[in-house]
Image (tube, rainbow, N blue to C red):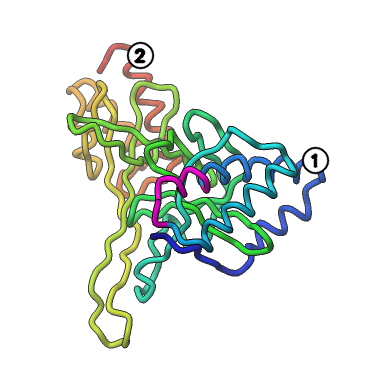
């Protein structure tokens, strides 16, 4: 059973509402309600054990949005956020604890002007919204997420290999055959017990790196293992690129990897891969 989690008002969200014009404000709220309502309704249908107070909240949100915007069918399912590991030190989110502006393609439809958090411990995406002056969080059902953005970072929900399970990856390189995929995660480990009631601590963000080549993912760790993925002719060119541009794979920024992947795709166009 999921209980509705409450948190302080979202200052960044409120500031954005105040500074935008009336039409933009309505568009933003409409995007939120379009995404939230079926999240609420279908999520409630999936969770037969939802308590009466949660049902009342769902009904209030739906009634308010339907009255204001006439929303009926563009609805998606999800469940209200329930905080876990409350005594753990740190947080489970990508980048930092705060929400970030982004967008989601959910069941093939794009929703923009959202505030999101990506929980890389549980591999869940959370939508933040305000109803009746209170901030709520909603889990987006992972199987319906096609892709999403957080700030300038793009993520896709893709399945590779024989098991068919979809996994969330940050992707670098768009509309090109060769791309970089990052899998982000966090671990929860035991603390030394010196702080009463706080027995666990979240790790820092951990990244596993993959090259998408010939329709499969190949893992790499540094410059050498990256270059060794390619045939000898391309390997020499890539090593020279590393040297000339002073690229160190383990420390490279997203922009540096974007430029690298563009270079590699030019090698592919020349038939050197």
User: Quick one: label 2, few (<14), some, or many (20+) residues within 10 Å?
Assistant: few
Q: Which mark is residue 161?
A: none
Residue under label 1 = 23
Instruction: From this view, report whether residue 201 is shown above or below residue 4.
Output: below
Q: Quadrant of the N terminus?
A: bottom left
Badge 1 vs badge 2, beta-carbon distance below 8 Å: no
Q: Position of residue 114 (x, y in %)?
A: 59, 46
> Residue at 19% across / 38% down in the picture?
225
In the image, taking residue 93 as reference, residue 216 lies left or right, namely left
Residue 128, percent from left and from top? 55, 54
Assign a secondary structure to mark 2. helix
The residue that mark 2 highlights is 269
Give how far apart the Cα atoms at labels 1 and 2 are.
46 Å
Q: Position of residue 183 (x, y in %)?
A: 31, 45
- Mark with earlier residue (1, 2): 1
Residue segment shown in magenta = 40-49
User: Horizontal and vertical percent for residue 70?
Assistant: 71, 37
- Is 264 located above or below residue 207 in the figure? above
Q: Secondary structure at mark 1?
A: helix
Bin the neighbour count of mark 1 within 10 Å (Cα to Cα): few under 14, some 14-19, many 20 and up. Answer: few
Residue at (23, 36) in percent of width and height? 226
Does the segment drawn in magenta span residue 78?
Answer: no
| Prevailing secondary structure of the magenta residues | helix
């Amino acid at each position: 059973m999921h209980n509705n989690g409450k948190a302080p008002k979202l200052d960044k969200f409120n500031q954005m509402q105040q500074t935008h014009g009336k039409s933009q404000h309505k568009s933003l709220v409409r995007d939120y309600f379009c995404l939230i309502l079926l999240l609420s309704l279908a999520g409630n249908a999936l969770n037969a054990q939802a308590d009466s107070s949660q049902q009342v909240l769902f009904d209030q949100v739906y009634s308010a949005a339907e009255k204001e915007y006439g929303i009926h069918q563009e609805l998606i399912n999800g469940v209200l956020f329930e905080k876990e590991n409350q005594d753990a030190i740190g947080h489970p989110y990508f980048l930092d604890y705060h929400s970030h502006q982004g967008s989601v393609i959910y069941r093939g439809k794009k929703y923009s002007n959202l505030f999101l958090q990506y929980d890389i411990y549980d591999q869940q995406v959370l939508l933040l919204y305000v109803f009746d002056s209170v901030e709520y969080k909603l889990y987006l059902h992972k199987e319906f997420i096609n892709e999403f953005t957080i700030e300038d970072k793009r993520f896709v929900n893709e399945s590779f290999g024989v098991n068919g399970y979809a996994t969330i990856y940050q992707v670098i390189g768009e509309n090109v055959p060769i791309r970089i995929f990052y899998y982000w995660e966090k671990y929860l480990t035991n603390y030394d017990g010196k702080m009463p009631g706080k027995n666990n601590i979240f790790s820092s963000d951990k990244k596993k790196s993959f090259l998408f080549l010939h329709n499969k993912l190949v893992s790499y760790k540094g410059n050498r293992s990256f270059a060794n993925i390619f045939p000898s002719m391309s390997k020499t060119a890539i090593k020279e690129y590393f040297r000339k541009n002073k690229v160190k794979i383990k420390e490279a920024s997203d922009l540096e990897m974007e430029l690298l992947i563009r270079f590699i795709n030019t090698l592919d166009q020349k038939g050197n891969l």
